[in-house]
Image (spheres, rainbow, N blue to C red):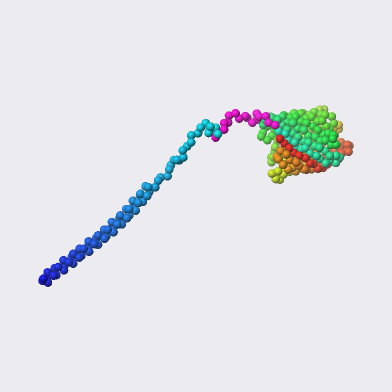
Amino acid sequence: MTRFAAFSLSLLSMSQAFAAGDMQGMDHSRMADMQGMDHSQMGDLQGMDDGMMQPAAPTESRTPIPTLTDADRAAMFTSHAGHQIHDSALNTYFLADKLEWQNADDASTLAWDVSGWIGGDIDRLWLRSEGERSNGKTEDAEIQALWGHAISPWWEVVSGVRQDFKPGAPQTWAAFGVQGMALYNFEAEATAFLGENGQSAVRLEGDYDILLTNRLILQPTAELNVYGKNDPQRGLGSGLANTEAGLRLRYEIRREFAPYIGVTWNRTYGNTADYAREEGEDRSEARLVLGVRMWF
């Protein structure tokens, strides 16, 4: 073989080698591109598949709605038919505000102050009674029958008659007044009386409950009596005749039943004090009281 032929063969071999190298480089790059494209596309497809495979949130309840029968409706809802108007109902109430023993100077005294009513929310018949007994003898006693008519949720006007049994001879009065609850739960009564022989009188009463605990209650009370003219037979003078202030501490064993202990202070004034002095009585007197308060 000549030198020229050998040189030609070597050149051919080198060209083939370069061609093979170019092919391999091109194949690797394209394969890499194809692999990268395939992986990204597969990721996108997987993401799309995962999103499409996740179930959508339900928009309607799958719990079946039961069909209500007439019995079910009757159990769920009460009928409003047949209800009575409250103020047309006939109700009753009784309160023994004072049933007590008093340690008076002369002798022990039993005193009472009770009231009650029958009727509705607007119109009621009221009955009141108060008095005292000492040494088995009634010293003071009266009873009132009044018709009450509500003029607001907390106040009512009353009118009727009052009958005095003691002291002195029985006496009848016509009665007019108002009663109710003022600010801060202060209960008040104001009553005017017109009696026989032109006698007149005014009585003011009030009490207030101070809750020391849910069951322990302190009750201050006050009463004031004024008369239009002298009545020597009954020991009553004109003007301010007498006052009574009390302080009672009660414990409500039940709301309807409460024993109590307290003190009262009585005082007479003017001509009434003069009449009391003539009878040998003190102008003022403090008493220890023990009693029970109840209502139903």
Q: In front here: 21 or 130? A: 21
Quarter of the image that includes the C terminus: top right
- Looking at the picture, how far across and down is residue 171, in whole percent? 81, 29
Q: Which quadrant would residue 273 be assigned to in this image?
A: top right
Across and down, in percent, residue 10 comes to 16, 68
Which residue is outermost to the left? 2
Query: Residue at 88% across / 38% down in the picture?
Result: 280
Q: Nearer the viewer, residue 97 or 183?
A: 97
Residue 88 is covered by the magenta coloring: yes
Q: Which stretch appears magenta?
A: 76-92
Left or right placement of residue 26 versus residue 208 in this view: left
Left or right: where 65 falls relative to 118: left
**x, y percent for residue 110:** 81, 37
Query: Can residue 204 be seen by looking at this rendering?
Result: no
Which residue is found at the position 76% from the left and 28% from the top?
A: 161
**Which quadrant, please, contains the N terminus?**
bottom left
Which of these two is toward me, 58 or 65? 65
**Per the image, is 106 magenta?**
no
Is any atom of residue 254 visible in this view? Answer: yes
Q: Nearer the viewer, residue 237 or 93?
A: 93
Residue in the picture at 70% in, 45% down: 213
Expressed as whole percent of the image width and height from the top left, the position of residue 136 reads 84, 35
What secondary structure is the magenta-colored segment mainly? loop
Q: Quadrant of residue 152?
A: top right
Q: Residue at x 77, y 33 (%)?
A: 129
282 up-or-down from 17: above or below: above
